[in-house]
Amino acid sequence: MTVFKGKGVYGAIAIGKVSLFKRQAAEVRRVSVDDPKKEIERIEAAKQKAVEQLTAIHDKALKEVGEANAEIFEIHIMMLDDDDYNESIVSIIETQKVNAEYAVAVTSDNFAEMFASMDDAYMQARAADVKDISNRLIACLTDSGSSENSTDEMMIVCADDLAPSETVSLDKDRVLAFVTAFGSSNSHTAILARSMNIPAVIGLGEEFLSAVSDGDMMIVDGHTGDVYISPDDETVKSFEEKQAEDTRKKQLLQELKGKENITLDGRKIGIYANIGGVGGIGAVLANDAGGIGLFRSEFLYLESEDYPTEEQQFQAYKKVLESMAGKKVIIRTLDIGADKQIDYFGLEKEDNPALGLRAIRICLTRPEIFRTQLRALYRASAYGSLGIMFPMITSVSEVEKCLAMCDEVKKELTADGIRIGENTEVGIMIETPAAAVISDRLAPLVDFFSVGTNDLTQYTLACDRQNAKLEAFADTHHEAVLRLIEMSAKNAHENGAWIGICGELAADLTLTEEFIRMGIDELSVSPPFVLPLREKVRGISLT
Ligand code: PEP
Ligand code: MG
């Protein structure tokens, strides 16, 4: 048995087998062959296998993310059958007498380059699709036997690190836990693990990668950050008991469902939930959240192969609003850049991406993207109680530009006879020190503030939230961060706005009383934290 210590980002226990995370792009070597015919047969078999995989993915996507988002997999199946694509592969095999993998890789590069050089944005985006189907084809060629992925067994996914897009694309029904060698607790992967209710430990260090193998038995303790490789029977038994204890505690919390979030001396606060997509609604309802305090809309973009259309976005927002049946739903406009990169946006590489062109800065410099999202949001506003929230605000003029764009969109829709909601609230994230410091100037412009403590901590303490080495310096209880929150709360209330917290700190039960004393009106947390927070609030007395 070997034990590693990392940082637990979601407190639960998992016991199971390891599945090492494999990135799709396999290294392809050029190999001369004597029998090109055999390579062509291998291609045919691999294509069939790839079509079967894509059909299964398409069916699953249809159920989980709807028809519009599932359509891309139908397109991938058609692309695999494209005459030009197939002729190129066969001709490379025949003329150069090389292995099938190499022929696919060269064809992929050629076609991707051709698409990328086209003028039309839609065709340019097809470059990523060609690469995607080619990688799948190469994977089917190199792994022709039945892969372990075909089993339905739940696994503990171990990786060096996971990008948010990689995390989203994992089959959540098969993931018992996430364990990574690198990463930090405020990274989006950690946030996703929390919102998916999956035990997760990060930052185990490089040695972990050489100590772990596919199929190893493992225990992941998300409470302490301990990870046991090949645990002995006694350790397994004691963790099975701890798991049973966790389950008992969860059952007790269920008794709080339907109860108010009220302190012993009568102060009520809102406890909302954070989600990353339509798929999160089930957890919000199951945990009895009073609303959605942060819908990270960028995940719609991250899960997509191309810019989601106005209609696709409208359907997603409408579904969330309808499912919440009149409870408040705060949808944050696109927040990409920094660690959330999307190929089809074609953003330039930056030396300091966290300080770069991200979030509202992208929306204000590419208004066509912003307008599409705002149109979808205001169309959806007719179906519930919507709040629109802008991320990464640093100045009054940015807010004024956002509001002007909202007014234009509302006028356009009304002129087209499209119904929009009457009580849509507009708010901003307080996640830069600048926004907190000028919160007295910003509050009169909006209905609400929501404090993004993940970024507010990063920018106030000058600690990159992605850098695991800085965990010791990124003190989330730092007086500077707490003073900025308090200052924002005071300025919000003096100017008729309400204030919530939607960063990870909202779930820190050691700060709940302090937040309520500051006058925070709402706390928005990952769905599994809603009931523990309710329990905490109900035990507080401010007098
Ligand atoms: C935050 O910064 O605290 C926040 C809620 O936004 P995100 O974590 O998505 O950057
Ligand atoms: Mg943020």
Image: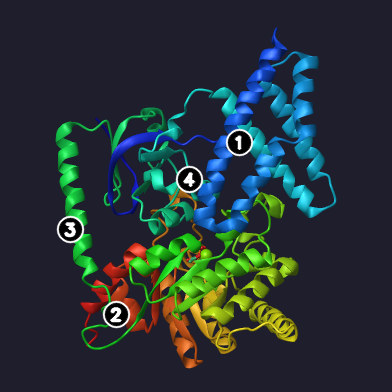
Q: Quadrant of the N terminus?
A: top left
How far apart marks 3 and 1 lie (CA) works out to 44 Å
Q: Is residue 427 visible?
A: no
Residue 383, image x, y percentages: 54, 79
Determine the image quadrant of residue 325: bottom left
**At numbered mark 3, what does the secondary structure look like: helix, strand or loop?**
helix
- Which mark's residue is nearer the viewer, 2 or 1? 1
Q: Residues within 10 Å of mark 4 (few under 14, many from 20)?
A: few
Q: Is residue 189 visible?
A: yes
Compared to 89, does 506 lie above or below?
below
How far apart marks 2 and 1 lie (CA) works out to 51 Å
Towards the viewer: 317 or 41: 41
Please tell me the numbered disc located at residue 170.
Answer: 4
Q: Amino acid at mark 1?
A: Val
Mark before the other along the chain sequence, 4 or 2: 4
Q: Residue at x 29, y 87 (%)?
A: 267
Q: Quadrant of the C terminus?
A: bottom left
Q: Which residue is mark 3?
A: 248
How far apart marks 2 and 3 lie (CA) works out to 22 Å
Q: Which residue is mark 2?
A: 261
Q: Which residue is mark 1?
A: 51
Q: Residues within 10 Å of mark 3 (few under 14, many from 20)?
A: few
Q: Residues within 10 Å of mark 2 (few under 14, many from 20)?
A: many
The answer to whether residue 37 is left or right of residue 492 is right
- Which mark's residue is nearer the viewer, 4 or 2? 4
Q: Residue at x 75, y 39 (%)?
A: 112
Q: Amino acid at mark 4?
A: Leu
Residue 138, image x, y percentages: 62, 28
Residue 377, image x, y percentages: 61, 74
Mark before the other along the chain sequence, 3 or 4: 4
Q: Amino acid at mark 3?
A: Arg
Q: Amino acid at mark 2?
A: Asn
